[in-house]
């Protein structure tokens, strides 16, 4: 089937006035951005509808891309015709016939935004329905639970027919909700947390703590690859890389082993808060899930959170590992995440980390360190780079 356009539906009900304009503008920009390799298309917006005019481009890849644009709830490949009895009947029949399997039941739904057309919505639905019943053997009309709905919209710019509704990602358009700094490790959880934040419309930056030479250049490449996966949903991600070796070494030398992870995390928070401020990010985000490991108990979160004032968003807080893994597979980060590269936390893992750390005790141990100077120095030496949507040579590709 040769389609002329893709109809884009978005969460329209909840939005009013100015918010809605901004939502639509951001969505339109993101749609244009993700479709920029397709020269011939045009994105149009008209009275609460958005659609992509294909102008001969293939609809399959374009639909796939649009499924990754947050804010879109569903998509329909559409044919656009100049309406007449014959063109309406022919186009609807062709649509039904182009489906992979002939449906047992259908219904026609007509909306007439352009009232100049001489037939009523009901008459148009009957005209098309009758034609399909006469030409498709064994098909029946079912008004309540049809397998397929043929949707007809008569608009001033043309008449749009479609019979498929492809689910998209939902959420809010990236860029509509301000900026968040994601603490991105090489594990399974934090890329999923980043994806969930993108789904709520934030602009994402990422910060990674790197302990060269305890962790290799490859471990950092893996983090870049993970950030690159996220660009498929969110566009460019700015990645900040913090040299963390000195701080980790000092903690290990001067603090009791069971508190090393707690103190290390407190440093991460302090540094991330500073970098977030410089970038204009209003919150941090992590991949923590309550009770998953020793450092993710409520006591731990308290003690770790105690050193900063910036809100920490934890989108995975109530999720089980298998739910997180499912999303990781869906967004294609899982295979990368499980590659066996050492992480700055695994290297310094104490035999028996404290599960109920106390802020006062952490503070006491930190008196052995010049916290302020260490934080400032790490922030000063942090490097930043842009991870763009452009293809990269990934670690995975090198390995296999
Ligand atoms: P993940 O799969 O995201 O690594 P995890 O289950 O291994 O999570 P932890 O290692 O306890 O959990 O880390 C908790 C959170 O702290 C991570 O989700 C991430 O947001 C942050 N984090 C941990 N290590 C780093 C790092 N080296 N750089 C940046 N953030 C980190
Ligand atoms: Mg980890």
Image: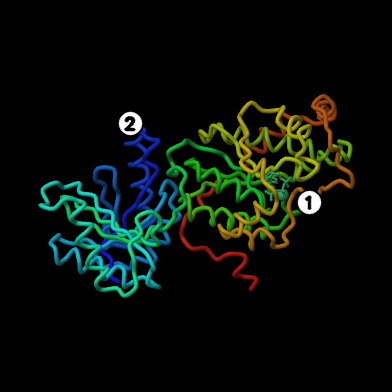
Q: Residues within 10 Å of mark 1 (few under 14, many from 20)?
A: few
Label annotation for residue 286: none
User: Which is in the foreground here, disc 2 or disc 1?
Assistant: 2
Pointer 2 or 1: first along the chain: 2
Residue displayed at 73% across by 62% down: 340
Closer-to-camera residue (14/181): 14
Q: Give the Cα separation between the discs numbered 2 and 1.
A: 48 Å
Residue 123, image x, y percentages: 18, 55
Residue 389, image x, y percentages: 46, 57
Closer-to-camera residue (34/139): 139
Residue 315, image x, y percentages: 61, 41
Residue marked by disc 1? 346
The quadrant of the rendering that contains the C terminus is bottom right
The quadrant of the rendering that contains the N terminus is bottom left
Q: Is residue 352 left or right of residue 302?
A: right
Asked whether mark 1 lies closer than 8 Å to ligand 2, one says yes
Q: Is residue 243 left or right of residue 22?
A: right
Q: Is residue 134 left or right of residue 360?
A: left
Q: Secondary structure at mark 1?
A: helix
Residue marked by disc 2? 18
Residue 80, image x, y percentages: 22, 61
Closer-to-camera residue (337/67): 67
């Amino acid at each position: 089937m040769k389609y002329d356009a893709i109809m884009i539906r978005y969460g329209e009900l909840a939005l009013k006035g100015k918010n809605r304009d901004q939502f639509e503008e951001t969505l339109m920009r993101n749609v244009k951005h993700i479709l920029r390799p397709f020269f011939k298309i045009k994105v149009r917006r008209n009275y609460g509808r958005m659609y992509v005019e294909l102008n001969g481009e293939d609809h399959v890849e374009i639909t796939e891309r649009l499924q990754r644009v947050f804010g879109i709830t569903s998509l329909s490949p559409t044919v656009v015709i100049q309406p007449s009895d014959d063109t309406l009947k022919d186009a609807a029949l062709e649509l039904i016939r182009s489906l992979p399997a002939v449906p047992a039941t259908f219904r026609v739904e007509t909306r007439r935004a352009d009232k100049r057309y001489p037939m009523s919505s009901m008459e148009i639905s009957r005209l098309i329905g009758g034609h399909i019943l006469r030409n498709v053997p064994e098909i029946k009309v079912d008004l309540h639970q049809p397998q397929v709905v043929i949707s007809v919209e008569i608009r001033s710019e043309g008449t749009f027919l479609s019979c498929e509704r492809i689910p998209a990602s939902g959420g809010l358009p990236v860029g509509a909700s301000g900026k968040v700094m994601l603490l991105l490790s090489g594990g399974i959880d934090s890329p999923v947390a980043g994806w969930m934040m993108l789904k709520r419309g934030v602009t994402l930056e990422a910060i990674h703590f790197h302990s060269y030479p305890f962790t290799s250049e490859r471990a950092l490449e893996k983090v870049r690859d993970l950030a690159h996966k996220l660009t498929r949903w969110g566009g460019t991600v700015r990645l900040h890389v913090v040299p963390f070796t000195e701080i980790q070494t000092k903690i290990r030398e001067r603090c009791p082993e069971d508190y090393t992870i707690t103190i290390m995390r407190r440093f991460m928070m302090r540094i991330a808060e500073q970098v977030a401020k410089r970038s204009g990010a209003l919150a941090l985000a992590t991949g923590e899930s309550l009770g998953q490991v020793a450092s993710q108990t409520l006591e731990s979160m308290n003690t770790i959170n105690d050193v900063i004032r910036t809100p920490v968003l934890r989108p995975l807080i109530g999720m089980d590992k298998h739910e997180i893994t499912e999303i990781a597979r869906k967004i294609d980060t899982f295979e990368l995440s499980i590659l066996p590269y050492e992480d700055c936390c695994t290297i310094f893992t104490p035999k028996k980390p404290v599960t109920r750390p106390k802020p006062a005790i952490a503070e006491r141990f930190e008196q052995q360190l010049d916290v302020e100077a260490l934080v400032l120095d790490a922030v000063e030496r942090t490097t930043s780079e842009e991870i763009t949507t452009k293809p990269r040579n990934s670690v995975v590709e090198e390995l296999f």
